Image (cartoon, rainbow, N blue to C red):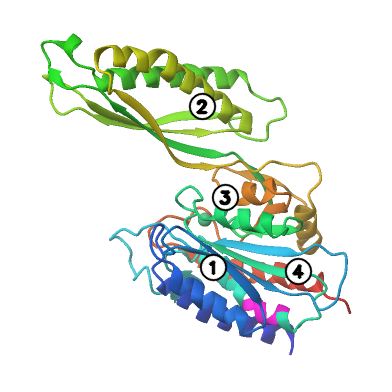
Amino acid sequence: MNTQKKTDENIKNFLSILSDLIAFKTISGQDNNDLINYCDNLLKKLGADSFRTFDDEKKRVNLFATLKSKKSSDKMPIILSGHTDVVPVSRNWKTDPFKATLKDNKIFGRGSCDMKGFIACALTYAPIFSKSNLDRDIHFSFTFDEETACQGAPLLIKELDKRKINKGICIVGEPTNMKIIDAHKGCYEYTTHFEGLAGHGSAPSKGVNAIEYAVSYVNKLLELREKLKMKVKNDSVFNPPYTTLQIGKISGGIARNVIADKCKVDWELRPVVKEDGVFVNNEMNNFVNEKLLPEMKKVYVNSSIKKEVIGEIIGFDRLNKSDACELISKITGDNSRDVVSFGTEAGLFQEIGISTVVCGPGSIEQAHKDDEFVSIDEIKKCFKMLEGIKNNSIRN
Ligand SMILES: [Zn+2]
């Protein structure tokens, strides 16, 4: 078959798979079993082995499937990694967000770009890989709830480490316009809950005002924010080059003349290095335990301050030598390296020793938006990369 014909056929298969994937309403937090079963069946038919990891209720599932190499070699296995969840949709879509719509060489639908498009590319290439004379394993890693602070992936990564699948190259296909991304900051999200004692506004000393303690807490965070700026590394690849901290939301109290017994603060931290996260959390724990809580408990012994961890997406660090980046450069001829401002699962793979790169079709500009789309041109670029992976993974 000539190249054009092959591409046309791949696009046809891709469209059919992506349409199926988009039709599964896998908004973060919801059941994704049907989508995982679909992917698993498709890969099993090609002879893949697979295993799953779950949340406690088995409502949300990670899938890890492997097309085994047919010959032994010293080539590292390759992991094609994508998350199966998508963000919620608004009413403003021009088309049905859960029905793939092809228009002007673009496919519209929730997740088309972030990142069911990449998963569909990987699944389109699965039969091509399986028919090839592979001399390395090709893995498919499909996770749940990446969009809600990477809740699914850690369960899978733990299992990979246990099974000693901790050497290899991982391509996280988040939308980067197929550019090579080799670093991003971490993203830690917290909600801190304050509970004091309600009372009449005319006698503040008889109650414990949760809002006022929350304000002290916020002030301490802002003080630390200034300290973080001082910790800037000269060789930082990020903009801004230091760890940032931000208060996103404060809610509490019921009326002007009532002492507020409850308050909560939503805040986030984007660490450049892990140590900054440890620094902030240690400082805040000390401040709470040595100053705020004792003061609150002096008036009301059941007062409390509880920090809830919404998620801690670890950063993805730039390394001097990256097998993953080098492989993509070799295939695509693109030697550039860049950073992004969004978080991904890349740092989790990197943490257990897997060489990782973020590179996938579509633009982050379209992610999480109404009328999300991925263009066919981007998909063709992704096919080129997968074709290169195949050629790098066969012995002629
Ligand atoms: Zn994503």
Is residue 370 shown above or below 285? below
Q: Give the residue furthest to the front.
A: 301
Work out whether mark 3 precedes mark 4 in sequence or the reverse, and give the earlier one: 3
**Mark number displayed over residue 344:** 3
Work out whether mark 4 precedes mark 2 in sequence or the reverse, and give the earlier one: 2
Residue drawn at x 81%, y 46% is: 321
Q: Nearer the viewer, residue 250 or 105?
A: 250
For residue 396, what is the image quadrant?
Answer: bottom right
**Mark number displayed over residue 389:** 4
Q: Is mark 3 within 8 Å of ligand 1?
A: yes
Q: Mark 4, residues whose alpha carbon is within 10 Å: few (<14), some, or many (≥20)? A: some
The residue identified by callout 2 is 281
For residue 219, what is the image quadrant?
Answer: top left
Residue type at tag 1: Gly
Mark nearer the viewer, 4 or 2: 2
Is residue 277 shown above or below 333? above
Can residue 244 be found in the magenta stretch?
no
- Report x, y in % for residue 204: 17, 11
Position of 159 with respect to 165 (left or right) is: left
